[in-house]
Image: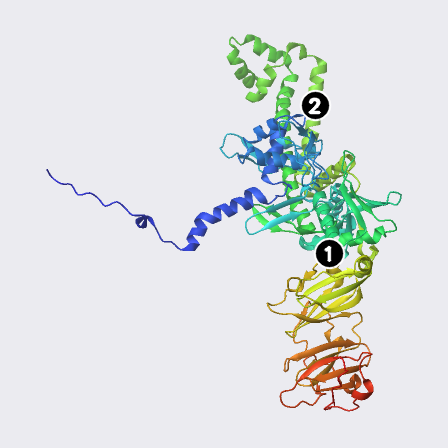
Amino acid sequence: MKKTKTKPQPTPENHITEQPITNALELNYMPYAMSVIVSRAIPEIDGFKPAHRKLLYTMYKMGLLASGRRIKSADIVGQTMRLNPHGDGAIYETLVRLTRGNDALVHPFVDSKGNFGKQYSRDMAYAASRYTEARLDVICREIFRDIDKNVVDMVDNYNATMLEPALLPTTFPNLLVTPNQGIAVGMASTVCSFNLREVCQTTIAWLKNPSHVISKTLLAPDFSTGGELIFNPEEIETIYATGRGSFKVRARYRHDEKNSCIEVFEIPYTTTIEAIIDKIVALVKAGKIRDITDVRDETDLQGLRITIDIKKNTNAEQLMHRLYTLTPLRESFSCNFNFLIDGRPRVMGIAEILHEWKIFRIACIKRQLKYDIAKKSEKLHLLEGLAKIILDIDKAIKIIRQTPSESQVIANLMAGFAITEAQAEFIAEIKLRHLNREYLQNRIDERKALQEELATLSATFDSEQKICELIIEQLKEIVKKYGAERRTQIVHAHEEPVHTEESFIEDYNLKIFLTGHNYIKKISLVSLRSADTQYLKDDDFIAQEIEATNRDELLLFTDKQNVYKIKIYDLPDCKASSLGEYLTNILGMDAGEKVIYLTVAKDYGGFMLFGFANGKIAKVKFDTYATKTNRKRLINAYSAKSPIVALHRSDEELDIYLRRSTDKAAIISSALIPLNTSKGSGGITAFTLRKNTQLTVMRPVTEGDDAEYYRIDKIPTTGHFLQRQMSI
């Protein structure tokens, strides 16, 4: 039997084809990126993303604008899937955002019935599509005006089974009225909403005068959730000119003095009730705000309401400005006016946006005029044929009667009166009862009216100025029908009360305890009165204690020549029965680093004394540690040439006790030490050392010290031998 050779099976390595990464990106990644940019994330000149446009057009074709009836949202979602294959969940989320019930838009496009959640709530979930109903809102008449007159291009849907509009012929600059946010590949778009009346009035003024100052009529953004916009002219002008920038919006509230509470009833557009409450609760638990006793969500059918219970005699205005600083009750809105123009993403200022919208709208109106001219021309053409037979109707009747076959009637009429086939068809269809003087006279009048209308339409079509006048009339009509007052109030930045950081901090007296194991305790004097026995670890001890207030700043010197700064109000309060806070964690200290001295910095007055083992003492101005920036750590806080023995801060000159090992001591005045402005100063020799001795103690003089015996008036000194009764 003849053996056949078997072909070797390819291994996985045989299928690997090397190619430059640039080719892989171009062939695989770029099509995806372009699809996201062009077909998903970035709004176009009509102010809609493709998902919005497909949904609204589906509802329009379902008759939900003309009939005025609501139908189940599930039905709308199902019909929309003929244009949008991304799944019912995504389509329904799009529908929810466009509804009146969701409150995401100042001018919603969908009139809804049922629970559609709320823009300002994170946890208020919308009901399933089978439970809710919707129809197009009346403002959609302006979105779809003349769409059946070929005013926009119609393109195939994803499977080429039906047509959909490439854009919607919005009769007002919807891209400035409807807020939009989208993240594409390598770019994003964030558009705030403006008041419809202001947008239309600005557009009218700009169409009349392209040099119009936009900010005179377009005052500021306007959001569906209201709030107060902190108006800064420079910020707004930058946004209007470039399409980029940011501004701040804060919540609105009222103070109920009778019930000792604050009611927040409008919040920034970019936050939620739950985010605000969670942050307030966290601040209260951390002890950073002490005036709040309770906070709760009391939102109901009447609208949003966050109730904050406060202590009596609390300054509500000051508390709210503190909350504005620390919570989402005040947030920034960053603008990035990025739109697709002719398939290309462009970041534009307001004037550029209005220019592009004008071009788009003129093109829509020209197509509508062209459609009307064609239709009226067809009608006029028929009436022109009728006019030819009016002079001899009897002849027309005779031709029809003498024609042996019905199929020859049209041809005979065309030959008898020199008219076209369409005109002959129109004449042949006229009923006998219409061959009276009144009917014929009406047709003559109609012909004359059509000639005048066509002349007007043609004149408008050929004149951009007349088209702009038509746009202005439409905008005025929109303002009259749909214009509404601003929801977001404008507060000028200079009118906002100025509060320093300290004015927000509750001030009270307290004590700071530093332990040998690097723990710190912040205990109010009120708490100490009830229980002053300090709880420590078995082998721990209190190394230092100082009095301070909650608004003071604390400086902590370590054995690694570093000094750390911390606001005392940033330290959590504790009780004597707790271990305190571990400084290594709070300050982010290096492993093995230990705090050896702490002091309060009120006005950075006075000086620091540093005693070193080599017998030298440095006297450094305390304001050397003051910094213009809010630095948390200063390195090289003192000299590292010799081990540090002790540190002490004083506001005035004082007597200090020095001891050399175990044999001699001296008391000198700090005035003998020259003042230095360099933190790294090694100091001057205060105590003369002999072999195998060092400076071991430096501290302020106490009552038990024999000042007369140990007093030295000059340095350096060898000191006096220790007396037995001398305390150390």
Q: Which residue shows up at 54% across the image and 18% down it?
A: 415
Which residue occupies the foreground of this view, 601 or 611?
A: 611
In the picture, which quadrant includes the C terminus?
bottom right
The picture quadrant where one finds residue 595 is: bottom right
In the picture, which quadrant includes the N terminus?
top left
Picture colour scheme: rainbow
The answer to whether 64 is drawn above or below residue 431 in the figure is below
Q: Is residue 419 visible?
A: no
Residue 491 as seen in the image, left or right of residue 459 = right
The answer to whether 187 is drawn above or below residue 430 in the figure is below
- Residue 267 horizontal/vertical position (percent): 75, 45
**Residue designated by label 2:** 446
Which residue occupies the foreground of this view, 118 or 708?
A: 708
Q: Residues within 10 Å of mark 1 (few under 14, many from 20)?
A: some
Contact, CB < 8 Å: mark 1 with mark 2? no
Amino acid type of disc 2? Glu
Q: Secondary structure at mark 2?
A: helix
Q: Secondary structure at mark 1?
A: helix
Which residue occupies the foreground of this view, 254 or 262?
A: 262
